[in-house]
Image (cartoon, rainbow, N blue to C red):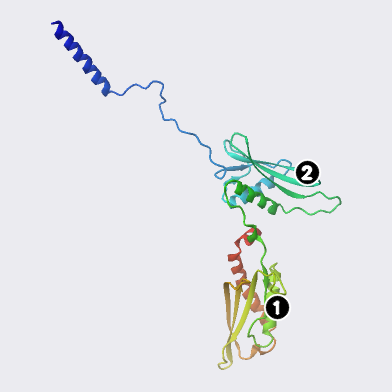
Amino acid sequence: MRYNAVKYALLAVAAFTFISACQPLERPFQPETKARLQTTAGPRASLYIAPVYNGNEEMSDILARHLQNLGIAAFSGDAQPNIYQIDSDIFLKDGSSFITWRIVDPFGRETQLATTQKIGTITNGPTFSDPDLKRIFLKSASEIDIMLGGAGVNFATLEKPTLFVPIVQNAPGDGSETLSAAMQSQFIKYGFDVLPEQWGATYFIKGEVSLTEPKGNSQIVSILWKLERPNGEFVGKVEQRNRIRAGTLNGPWGPVAIAAAKGGARGILKLLRQVEPGYFGKKS
């Protein structure tokens, strides 16, 4: 009897152990939800530009816009917690003014990433010229972008194109000279530097005229304007065609040259905007 009692007792313990093993084990002191690692967005994802110490509100706005153009989600105005920000101040040293931009982490700690730009020189007298803040802050934005892993600004693309317009080929009458002079005048009005010689020009504007044989009392005049680089690389072309009275252009072109140059210059300007987006973007 005693043996059977012990046997039944052991079977009961084994059964209890088996049943218990099938149940979920208790996990004391465990949170109800899984813990998640809270990470702060990097400075390119959100970067607050704090007001410039000793500066004005416009300065932080200018820098923010330049950084946005470089793919950084920068903003000015009201601050937000727990994000990277840029602190800055303007100071004087050796008769000149400077601005320093410092990247600060979400905990307010210096990151040792900073850039300083010269604003201008302090001069005596009643007259002074305002510094080009847009250019200065563009340089600042470029260096901040590089510090944050970007490529920065290619400043070579921001230089104003310089032009050379040679004598137009195959124009009857005085068209070769008057067309070239009229095209030069149009681009001078646009604010470009038009050089008297090809040396130093970044683009050539070459013109060529062709005339059909007269039919009846009329003929077709075509003017081809080509935009090229100094190495001969073809950039683009603008073509103009018009029906005129036969022989009209055998003498002075006069207003016809001006009208043709205006139309051709508009087309060449569109080509320049396409191949020089950095310069034209800087102007806008």
The residue that appears at 34% across and 21% down in the rendered structure is 26
What number of labels is visible?
A: 2
- Residue 84's x, y, as percent? 59, 39
Asked whether 215 or 107 is in front, the reply is 107
Asked whether 147 or 195 is in front, the reply is 147
Asked whether 182 or 145 is in front, the reply is 145
User: Is residue 178 visible to the viewer in this orientation of the structure?
Assistant: yes
- How crowded is the residue under tag 1: few (<14 C-alpha within 10 Å), some, or many (20+)? some
- Residue type, numbered disc 2: Leu
Residue 90 in the figure: left or right of residue 236: right
What numbered label is drawn on residue 92?
2
For the C terminus, the quadrant is: bottom right
The residue that appears at 59% across and 50% down in the rendered structure is 68
- Residue type, numbered disc 1: Ala
Residue 81 in the figure: left or right of residue 10: right
Give the Cα distance between marks 2 and 1.
Answer: 49 Å
Instruction: Look at discs 2 and 1 and give the one toward the viewer.
Output: 2
- Residue 135's x, y, as percent? 69, 54
Quarter of the rendering containing residue 205: bottom right
- How crowded is the residue under tag 2: few (<14 C-alpha within 10 Å), some, or many (20+)? some
Which secondary structure lies at badge 2? strand
- Residue 222's x, y, as percent? 58, 83
Residue 14 in the figure: left or right of residue 147: left
Which secondary structure lies at badge 1? helix
Disc 1 target residue: 181
The residue that appears at 40% across and 24% down in the rendered structure is 30
Q: Is 53 rendered above or below residue 207?
A: above
